[in-house]
Amino acid sequence: MKEFWNLDKNLQLRLGIVFLGAFSYGTVFSSMTIYYNQHLGSAITGILLALSAVATFVAGILAGFFADRNGRKPVMVFGTVIQLLGALLAIGSNLPGHVNPWSTFIAFLLISFGYNLVITAGNAMIIDASNAENRKVVFMLDYWAQNLSVILGAALGAWLFRPAFEALLVILLLTVLVSFFLTTFVMTETFRPIVKAKEESENIFQAYKTVLQDKTYMIFMGANIATTFIIMQFDNFLPVHLSNSFKTITFLGFEIYGQRMLTIYLILACVLVVLLMTTLNRLTKDWSHQKGFIWGSLFMAIGMIFSFLTTTFTPIFIAGIVYTLGEIVYTPSVQTLGADLMNPEKIGSYNGVAAIKMPIASILAGLLVSISPMIKATGVSLVLALTEVLAIILVLIAVNRHQKTKIN
């Protein structure tokens, strides 16, 4: 934790806010699919989840634009205010004897929207307040904090979701209140925008057009989408594969079937990140960001492919370790590399564009699940292998273009 205390105060606060947000996700958000399904049915639940994904994407786009125009802090404060309104509405919608799932959905839509405003502007703040020497460490700590808080939040959520959902909502409100206080009264601005006459009349579409015309960054985004597609298998084909093909075993009288194996896989990943993140970061500190991207994503792909080609506990458990070791190396490397490729004057807009990788990768991963009955696990594995090759080629091209630009 020495690295944490050596950071700029704003970076420490940003990491604390990320911890609180991820903790809230672990306690409540991760179980909201069950909540909607119980009250509204599976068909409507699917539509609501799709609307939530669209709303969070829009939040990222708006946050990126306004963070460049007005500074990071105002966007983050506005985001926490929206979260507060959502948390209060969630509590009011789930009073004993007066449960309203529709207003609960609106409440969580507000919370997600506000949180993504905070995260996108906060990512820009990380780049503002860090430097080339410590930026990778900051992204490493950011990833570490998220995984630790998810573990703690998931444990609390699993314990209280059914018997004391209202208590979880109160905890959610308290975490948002703390975030609001830290953002509003303790955090300072890291970016003072100087809007030129030409930029004064620039609308959001023109701002993002400038980013989209940066060929080097967009090539990198292609590589990032490819690797995110591999990561998204965690929520898409991996559950399907384990549910359909995993060979159930009994360990110490405890039955482990597909769904439980998925939980073990998730817990294993989070625990390894918390325990090994600092050690692996120290071992790879002299690696270039490109090398970290390539080797990290390669291990992720190998681990996920191996998970799909096996159906028994021990090989899948080992595959989970391989995947997670790759993700530990990959995550801070890809984030730092992406930051290096951004135009310093439009960091917010670049972070807004970066928000597209999740919905695009999620759509592609969903399509892969749809065709998986035809191509089987072997075909899915081949798609992942080709995707990884594409990612490596694209990141090599992007870095090479960037280096040539710096020389010229």
Image: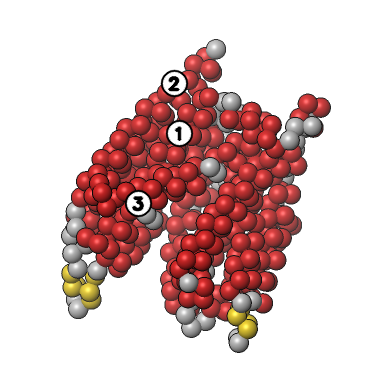
Image x and y of residue 39, in percent: 51, 76
Residue type (three-letter) at the residue carrying disc 1: Gly
Q: Which residue is at 54% across, 18% downward?
A: 406
In terms of sequence position, does the residue under pointer 1 or pointer 2 come before the other?
1
- Which residue is identified by label 2? 400
Q: Is residue 204 above or below residue 233?
A: above
Residue type (three-letter) at the residue carrying disc 2: Asn
State if disc 2 and disc 1 touch (CB < 8 Å): no
In terms of sequence position, does the residue under pointer 2 or pointer 3 come before the other?
3
Q: Quarter of the image holding residue 129?
A: top right
| Residue reaching furthest to the top | 408
Image x and y of residue 152, in percent: 46, 67
- Which residue is identified by label 1? 222
| Residue reaching furthest to the right | 197
Mark in the foreground, 1 or 3: 3
Image x and y of residue 143, in percent: 47, 50
Mark in the foreground, 2 or 3: 3
